[in-house]
Amino acid sequence: MSGTTMIVLIVFIAVGFSVISKMFNQYLSQQKSLQSKQNDALQTELNALKERVATLEKIVTDDGYALKEQFKKL
């Protein structure tokens, strides 16, 4: 192999690694964005479920509910 061929090969390898590195970084940023959106959606769903559980706890611990259950047992 001549010196010129080696230099051209080294340049192609360097450019190739540069391109692959940029593509990988772009892929990672897209994954982070997607994961962030999913986390936001899950957090919203979790907050809604917490509100529902709190409402159910209020209903179950209400004296009127306990009285209705006692009437049903009779």
Image: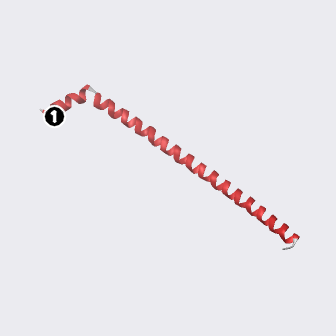
Q: Quadrant of residue 46?
A: top left
Q: How many marks do you count on the picture?
A: 1
Given residues 60 and 2, the one toward you in this image is 2
| Horizontal side, residue 43 vs residue 28: left or right | left
Which residue corresponds to the image point at 19% horizontal and 32% vertical from the top-left? Answer: 69
Residue 64 x %, y %: 24, 27
Circle 1 crowding by C-alpha within 10 Å: few under 14, some 14–19, many from 20 = few
Residue 43 x %, y %: 49, 41
Looking at the image, residue 49 lies above or below residue 71: below
Residue 60 x %, y %: 28, 31
Which residue corresponds to the image point at 62% horizontal and 53% vertical from the top-left? Answer: 30
Looking at the image, residue 11 lies above or below residue 59: below
Residue reaching furthest to the top:
63
Which residue corresponds to the image point at 59% horizontal and 52% vertical from the top-left? Answer: 31
Residue reaching furthest to the bottom:
1
- Give the quarter of the figure containing the C terminus: top left
- Give the quarter of the figure containing the N terminus: bottom right
| Horizontal side, residue 38 vs residue 17: left or right | left
Colour convention: secondary structure
Q: Quadrant of residue 63?
A: top left
Looking at the image, residue 50 lies above or below residue 63: below
Looking at the image, residue 20 lies above or below residue 61: below
Q: Amino acid at mark 1?
A: Lys
Residue that numbered label 1 is attached to: 72
Given residues 67 and 53, the one toward you in this image is 53
Which residue corresponds to the image point at 87% horizontal and 73% vertical from the top-left? Answer: 2
| Horizontal side, residue 45 vs residue 58: left or right | right
Question: What kind of element bears circle 1?
Answer: helix
| Horizontal side, residue 45 vs residue 67: left or right | right
Residue reaching furthest to the right:
3
